[in-house]
Image (tube, rainbow, N blue to C red):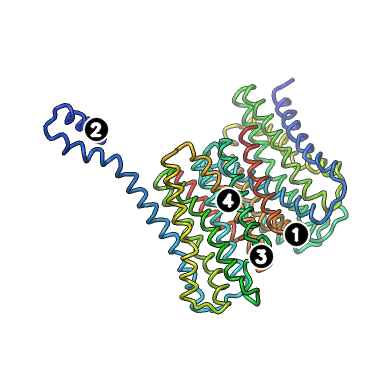
C-alpha cells in the first residue's frame, strides 16, 4: 500500500494536468510527519512535566511526610531513572560506539560542573527543618537542571522511534511524581502553600519540555549526533541518580528497603524494555 | 590431551585471570577512609556495568527467563542476608557488618561464576577457534571482577596475595562447570538465560544494599558519583571492545 502513493505522484507529475493539486499534498506529507512528531514530543514531554503535580497529592493527607517516605520516594525515582538509562543504552545504542561513550562522559561533566558552578555540590537536598533562606531556591534550581537532562532523554528517545519515545516520556512522567513529592514537602515545610508548591514543581519541569524539543530537533536534523546525545542522556541520568537521588536515601530509611524499592522500580522498566525490544 | 581435559584447563586459566584483579592494590600504600569509600564506589560501578552487560546478553536468549532469573537472584541475596544477620559471621579476622559484606561479595561472585563456566563449556561445542576467543574474553572479563572483590576485601585488612587468592576461588566454578556444560551442551544452553539473569539481579541488589551505601559513608557524594558512573561506563566499553 505505501509503495503505491509515490508511484502515483510520479505518474501524476509526468502526465501534467492537475499537477500542483497532487504534488502539494505529496510534498506536504514529507514535512508533516516531522512536524507531527515535534508536536508529539511537545505533548508527551508536557504530560511528563505535568505529572509532577501529582507529587503534591500525598501531601494533602499528610502535610509533612516522614523521613522514611522521602527516602523511599527518592529510591523509587532513582530506580526508574536507572531503568530509563539502561533502556536508552540498550534500545538506542545497541552496540555502544565511541561517540556514545564520549557523550556519556560529557553528560557526567555537565551535571558535575553545573553543580559546582551553582554551589550546590554539597547541599543536602531533603532538608525539611531549619535551613538558610536561599535553600528553597537552590533546591528549585537543582530540580530545573535535573529536569533538563530528563528532557534530553525524552527528545532523543523520540528521535530513535515514536513508541520508544512515548515509553521514555511515560517512564520520566512516573519518575517525576515521587521526585515532585520530595520537592513539595521541602517547599511546604518552608511555608509555601501546597498549591504553589505543586505549581513550582511543574514549573521546574518546564526545562524538560524545552530540552526535549531542542534535543529532538537537533538529532532529527543531524542524525550523526544521535549516539552523542544518547550517550549524554545516559551519562547524565546515571550521574544524577548517584549524586542527587541515592546518597541521602540511605540515611532516611533502612538499606534493605531502599535497595528493594530501587531494584523493583528498575526491574519494572527493564521488564517493559526487554519485552518491547 | 583429551578435549574434556582441555576444556577443564581453559576454565582454570579464566579462573586464574581473576587473581590479576588484586594487582592494583599491591601499589596502594595507605588505606584512608576516603580510599575505602572510593574502592566501594569502584566495585559498585564495575558490578552495575557488568549487570547491564549481562542483562542485555540474557535478553538475547530470552527476556522472561532472564527476568525470572533476576528476581530469583534478588530473593537469594535477601535470604542470604537474613541468614547472615542472624549469625555472628566472621571472615578471617573481620567480624560484624564488614565480614557480612565480604562474605556476600564472595558468595555472589562465586555463584556468578557458574554461568561463566557454562559459557566456556558451551562455547567448545562451536569449534576450537570460537572457544578460544570466548575463553580469552571471559578471562579478561574476570580481571575487573577480581578488582571488585579485592576492592571490598582489601579495605578490611586482607593482604594483597589473599585478595588474589579469594578472587581465584570465586572463579573456581568456571573449570568445574565448563566440563559438564561441554558434555551436555543442549541442556546447559537452555539454562543460560536464567543463570545470567540470576547473576545480574544478585549483583545489582548487592550494590544497592551493601556496597554503594558504604561508598557514601566516608566520601562526599559528587566524587562517589563520578567514580561510579565512570567505572560503569568503562566496564561497558571493556565488555564491548575486549
Query: Circle 4 — which element?
Result: helix
Q: How many residues crowd around disc 1 within 10 Å: few (fewer than 14), some, or many (20 or more)?
A: some
From the viewer's perspective, is residue B114 above or below residue A269? above
Q: In this rendering, do the residues under marks 1 and 2 share a single chain? A: no
Total marks in image: 4
Q: Are marks 3 and 1 in contact (CB under 8 Å)?
A: no
Residue linked to disc 2: A6
Q: In this rendering, do the residues under marks 4 and 2 share a single chain? A: yes
Q: How many residues crowd around disc 3 within 10 Å: few (fewer than 14), some, or many (20 or more)?
A: some
Query: Circle 1 — which element?
Result: helix
Residue linked to disc 1: B84
What separation in Å lies between label 2 and label 3 (alpha carbons)? 59 Å
Relative to B181, is A273 on the left or the right? Answer: left
Residue linked to disc 4: A236
Relative to A260, is B155 on the left or the right? Answer: right
The label shown at residue A123 is 3
What separation in Å lies between label 1 and label 2 (alpha carbons)? 69 Å
* Residue at the left extreme of this rendering: A17
Q: How many residues crowd around disc 2 within 10 Å: few (fewer than 14), some, or many (20 or more)?
A: few
Amino acid at each position: 500500500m505505501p509503495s503505491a502513493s509515490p508511484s502515483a505522484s510520479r505518474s501524476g507529475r509526468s502526465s501534467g494536468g492537475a499537477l500542483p493539486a497532487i504534488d502539494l499534498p505529496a510534498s506536504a506529507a514529507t514535512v508533516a510527519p516531522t512536524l507531527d512528531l515535534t508536536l508529539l514530543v511537545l505533548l508527551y514531554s508536557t504530560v511528563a512535566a505535568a505529572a509532577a503535580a501529582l507529587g503534591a497529592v500525598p501531601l494533602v493527607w499528610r502535610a509533612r511526610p516522614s523521613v522514611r517516605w522521602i527516602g523511599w520516594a527518592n529510591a523509587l525515582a532513582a530506580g526508574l531513572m536507572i531503568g530509563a538509562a539502561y533502556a536508552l543504552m540498550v534500545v538506542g545504542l545497541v552496540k555502544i560506539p565511541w561517540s556514545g561513550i564520549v557523550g556519556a562522559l560529557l553528560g557526567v561533566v555537565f551535571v558535575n560542573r553545573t553543580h559546582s558552578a551553582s554551589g550546590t555540590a554539597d547541599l543536602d537536598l531533603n532538608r525539611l527543618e531549619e535551613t538558610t533562606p536561599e535553600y528553597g531556591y537552590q533546591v528549585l534550581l537543582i530540580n530545573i537542571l535535573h529536569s533538563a537532562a530528563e528532557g534530553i532523554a525524552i527528545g532523543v528517545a523520540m528521535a530513535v522511534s515514536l513508541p520508544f519515545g512515548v515509553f521514555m516520556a511515560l517512564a520520566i512522567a512516573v519518575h517525576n511524581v515521587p521526585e515532585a513529592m520530595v520537592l513539595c514537602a521541602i517547599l511546604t515545610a518552608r511555608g509555601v502553600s501546597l498549591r504553589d508548591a505543586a505549581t513550582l514543581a511543574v514549573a521546574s519541569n518546564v526545562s524538560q519540555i524545552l530540552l526535549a524539543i531542542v534535543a529532538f530537533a537537533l538529532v532529527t536534523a543531524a542524525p550523526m549526533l544521535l549516539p552523542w546525545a544518547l550517550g549524554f542522556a545516559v551519562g547524565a541520568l546515571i550521574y544524577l541518580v548517584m549524586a542527587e537521588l541515592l546518597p541521602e536515601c540511605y540515611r532516611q530509611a533502612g538499606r534493605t528497603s531502599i535497595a528493594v524499592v530501587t531494584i523493583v522500580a528498575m526491574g519494572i522498566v527493564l521488564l517493559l524494555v526487554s519485552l518491547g525490544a | 590431551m583429551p578435549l574434556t581435559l582441555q576444556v577443564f584447563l581453559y576454565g582454570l586459566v579464566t579462573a586464574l585471570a581473576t587473581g590479576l584483579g588484586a594487582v592494583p592494590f599491591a601499589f596502594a600504600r595507605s588505606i584512608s577512609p576516603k580510599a575505602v569509600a572510593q574502592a566501594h564506589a569502584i566495585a559498585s560501578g564495575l558490578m552495575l556495568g557488568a549487570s547491564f552487560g549481562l542483562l542485555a546478553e540474557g535478553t538475547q536468549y530470552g527476556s522472561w527467563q532472564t527476568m525470572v532469573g533476576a528476581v530469583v537472584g534478588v530473593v537469594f541475596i535477601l535470604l542470604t542476608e537474613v541468614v547472615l544477620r542472624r549469625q555472628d559471621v566472621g571472615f578471617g579476622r573481620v567480624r560484624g557488618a564488614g565480614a557480612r559484606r565480604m562474605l556476600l561479595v564472595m558468595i555472589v561472585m562465586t555463584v556468578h561464576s557458574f554461568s561463566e563456566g557454562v559459557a566456556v563449556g558451551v562455547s567448545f561445542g562451536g569449534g576450537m577457534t570460537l572457544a578460544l576467543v570466548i575463553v580469552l574474553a571471559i578471562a579478561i572479563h574476570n580481571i575487573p571482577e577480581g578488582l571488585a572483590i579485592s576492592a571490598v576485601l582489601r579495605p578490611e585488612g586482607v593482604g594483597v596475595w589473599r585478595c588474589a587468592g579469594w578472587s581465584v576461588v570465586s572463579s573456581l566454578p568456571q573449570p568445574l562447570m565448563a566440563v559438564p556444560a561441554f558434555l551436555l551442551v543442549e541442556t546447559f544452553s537452555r539454562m543460560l538465560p536464567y543463570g545470567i539473569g540470576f547473576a545480574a539481579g544478585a549483583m545489582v541488589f548487592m550494590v544497592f544494599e551493601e556496597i554503594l551505601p558504604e561508598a557514601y559513608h566516608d566520601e562526599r557524594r559528587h566524587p562517589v558519583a563520578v567514580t561510579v558512573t565512570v567505572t560503569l561506563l568503562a566496564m561497558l566499553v571493556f565488555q564491548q571492545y575486549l
